[in-house]
Amino acid sequence: MAQFKTQDLLPDTTVICAGDSFLVKFSEDQVNRLATYTWQTPKAIIVHSKQIYLKYKGLHIVKINDGKKQLIDTTYLKLNEKPKLKLRDTSLCGQPIHLHLTNKSYKYTWSTGETGDQIKIERPGTYWVKANNKGCFFSDTFKVIQANVAIPNFTREITMCENEPGKILSIKAPADVKLFWNTGANTPSINATKEGLYWVKSTSAQCGIKTDSVTIKYKNCDCDIFIPNSFTPNDDERNDHFAPVFQCDYNYFQITIMDRWGNTVYTSTNINAKWDGRFKGNPCPDDVYVYRLEAVQKGNDKKVIRNGHISLFR
């Protein structure tokens, strides 16, 4: 029986992605064009084929007879798994979305430029992520829309002056969002007529049921500064401006308002000035802003510093 001579025609190991195939064929510089072939794969024996697509994991053997000599060579086919991703379209429901991808062995590239296995999404839009597993790639695209959701304007605790004429708690709620307060009201605003815990439940088709709460406390404000926690600069001549209300005279006053990223959108040393919700003439978006107020009382030079949040609704 003729002996086959081992020939270095194939790499010892061939690596491809699962589901792909690798074409093996030889040039006339390597093998006589009149040669005959016998291929042995993990699945079958194939004869009289000058080329073959490798796609099954395991040892592949080729025997070649060119009439003068008989050659044999092997390659072991390894399969790398293609990444599997299936990201669904989702909605922003008043809070940032935190996406965590489960396979930490993959390398990721996001449309935002980030490269980790998680991402924080704060704005609606179309996003994509590409996963790389040892040279095998898969990408997925998903959309994030801004959902209709009620946005409370309060924090965990609010202190109000006893003599305030209206102790209002407000929520921005689109028409298709249903509200229910623990007072029994179902309106966007209520009057906090007494101290205690107030909670509101909102229901929407996209974001489901969400609940938020606030504790209201009263204090004597004989000489205090009343600072509204929300305003609606929509030119309806109701609550269109933000301005502190003073019950005493002050020698010095300054207020600074910043957005959530720390950018100053309004500042003034005029105690009678009012913010119209604009920055450089352009309307600021609906959001929660941070203020810092400093004032010095006339007569006793007592310095007052107040920090807090303002909700801008249009």
Image (cartoon, helix red, strand yellow):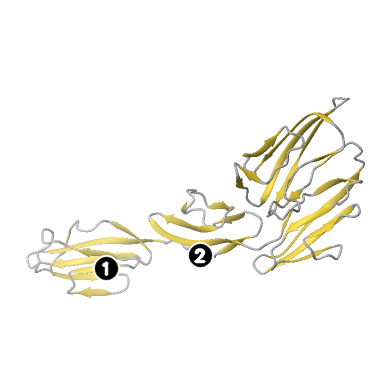
Residue 139, image x and y in percent?
44, 60
Quadrant where the N terminus is found in the figure: bottom left
**Residue located 83% across and 65% down the image:** 185
> What residue is pinned by disc 2?
86
Which image quadrant is residue 243 in? top right
> Where 271 falls versus 70 (above or below)?
above
**Residue located 75% across and 57% down the image:** 171
Quadrant where the C terminus is found in the figure: bottom right
**Residue located 47% across and 48% down the image:** 113
Which image quadrant is residue 176 in? bottom right
Which of the two discs, 1 and 2, labels the residue nearer the N terminus? Answer: 1
Circle 1 or circle 2, nearest the eye: 2
Amino acid identity at mark 1: Tyr
Task: Give 243 or 133, whichever is nearer the viewer.
Answer: 243
Image position of 49 (left or right of 134): left
**SS at mark 1 in the image:** strand
Image position of 250 (left or right of 266): right
Image position of 54 (left or right of 156): left
> What residue is pinned by disc 1?
53
Q: Residue furthest left?
A: 68
Task: Give 227 or 198, whichever is nearer the viewer.
Answer: 227
Q: CA distance from mark 1 to mark 2?
A: 29 Å
Mark number displayed over residue 281: none
Task: Give 96 or 299, whichever is nearer the viewer.
Answer: 299
Amino acid identity at mark 2: Lys
Q: Residues within 10 Å of mark 1 (few under 14, many from 20)?
A: few
